[in-house]
Amino acid sequence: METNKPLLFLLFLAVSAVLADEDVFIGVNIGTELSDMPHPTQVVALLKAQQIRHVRLFNADRGMLLALANTGIKVAVSVPNEQILGVGQSNTTAANWVTQNVISHYPATNITTICVGSEVLSALPNAAPILVNALKFIHSALLASNLDRQIKVSTPLASTIILDSFPPSQAFFNHTVKPVLIPLLKFLQSTNSYFMLNVYPYYDYMQSNSVIPLDYALFKPLAANKEAVDSNTLLHYTNVFDAMIDAAYFAMADVNFTNIPVMVTESGWPSMGESNEPDATVDNANTYNSNLIKHVLNKTGTPKHPGIAVSTYIYELYNEDAKAGPLSEKNWGLFSNNGTPVYILRLTESGSLFANNTSNQTYCVAKEGADTKMLQAGLDWACGTGKVNCAPLMQGGPCYDPDNVAAHATYAFDAYYHMMGKAPGTCDFTGVATITTTNPSHGTCLFSSTGKNGTFLNGTAPAMDSTSSSAYSVRYCNAFSTTLMMILGTLGLSLVLL
């Protein structure tokens, strides 16, 4: 197949034409199985702060769609699996779903995609026979409202429906799903939509019994003799992700579909797992997602289709602590529910996407093992003469805990360092401070590269002027904090948002 160069070139052009409709992007899935799910406005604030411009919802939550209005963020909404049967059996039900969950929000909320179910063929096989009908009914409703060109319709599929995925050129679809898959591919082709695939190299690695090297799963550089070679095409593969994408292309070609682009609707790596999941670590999760983002945005493409990048949604925005299953299932998120990064992505070529990366970001922190009295003196100076706003360090403030001198000194040192524009000599404090690229954020205490440290997620913080700041003794015992608040109240000083 690969030796037919004229045919290959025509196929390349066909796929390129389809993919040229929109620039490649990295998006994020937003799951909701959290014991304390942030309010939609908080979710959107995080998305905007991180410059995330594409999101996928697992439903069509009204509050979330309203919060996303007028943000410009491109949204993929979903028909949940439990609604597939109703939508797939009734054109009217499908039309009502589109009216309520799409038309009533569009165009203020920039809905670009409707995902009909999630891994229906494997997770909900009883609904498989009506899956294509569900897509067609949803599309018909969009067509009736002249939105069929603006909003794509597809269904995310598990990569497990592709069998014999390596070498990719031998891949084919599970024969049991072909009666549904062939009509599905015809629909996607006729509507210029995407073949949506969930790709999890973590699971491929875990289930390979050490056949797949960890570096190959994590996009780490490989020596030429370590690359996987497709013996039929002689194409070299340096990572599992590309191999799975090409397996999808070859599987579609096996049933005579060669011009349907692939979109990855889920991919990621867990940051924590059970004792039998030793590679579910923060470092591996950081490595995988950082490399994935760079790989996609560099428009590297795959060995079969070089230069044709595959837009991808990272799984996922938040850790879902209420999710059933092993520990790893709860720890795929980039952030905890209070917006604190689980890890700092190592990005250098992603533009402004994911502002929690450490490229060119430095912080001023207390030196490990520094003398407590010296730290105390530096802290007193920063909150006094240095004119740092130390209100977040007061009892009840977002940076009060942990209540120790080193943690509080780190807050004050870093705030002063940024307030002075990171000028040379502003992170010294008589030798007890040092510069680091590791973000010292913890819990509700968020450090910013702009120096606006500390945040109140669900409340207000007491404001402190320069006088109160200089009078702020930095032993931080509870009694003194309470007394200070009483004095402020007696003086009638107002409380304002930090």
Image (spheres, grey):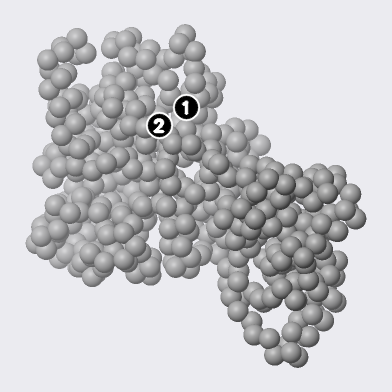
Q: Going 15% across and 27% down the picture, which residue do you hit?
A: 13
Using residue 39 as the reference point, say whether residue 282 is left or right of it: right
Name the amino acid, label 2. His
Q: Going 21% across and 50% down the picture, which residue do you hit?
A: 153
Q: Is residue 232 visible?
A: yes
Considering the numbered disc 1 on the image, is that residue within a helix, a strand or a loop?
loop
Q: Mark 1 to mark 2: distance in Å?
A: 8 Å
Using residue 275 as the reference point, say whether residue 129 is left or right of it: left
x, y percentage for residue 343?
58, 45
x, y percentage for residue 227?
44, 14
x, y percentage for residue 423?
65, 49
- State the residue in front, 87 or 24: 24
Query: Which label was assigned to residue 219?
Result: 1
Q: Quadrant of the N terminus?
A: top left
Query: Which label was assigned to residue 295?
Result: 2
For discs 1 and 2, the disc positioned in front in the rendered view:
2
Q: Going 26% across and 66% down the picture, which residue do you hit?
A: 108
Q: Going 78% across and 85% down the picture, which residue do you hit?
A: 487
x, y percentage for residue 38?
51, 65
* Occupied quadrant, residue 302: top left
Q: Are marks 1 and 2 in contact (CB under 8 Å)?
A: yes
Using residue 38 as the reference point, say whether residue 249 is left or right of it: left
Considering the numbered disc 2 on the image, is that residue within a helix, a strand or a loop?
helix
Q: Eyeballing the image, is 192 above or below 478?
A: above
- State the residue in front, 331 or 307: 307
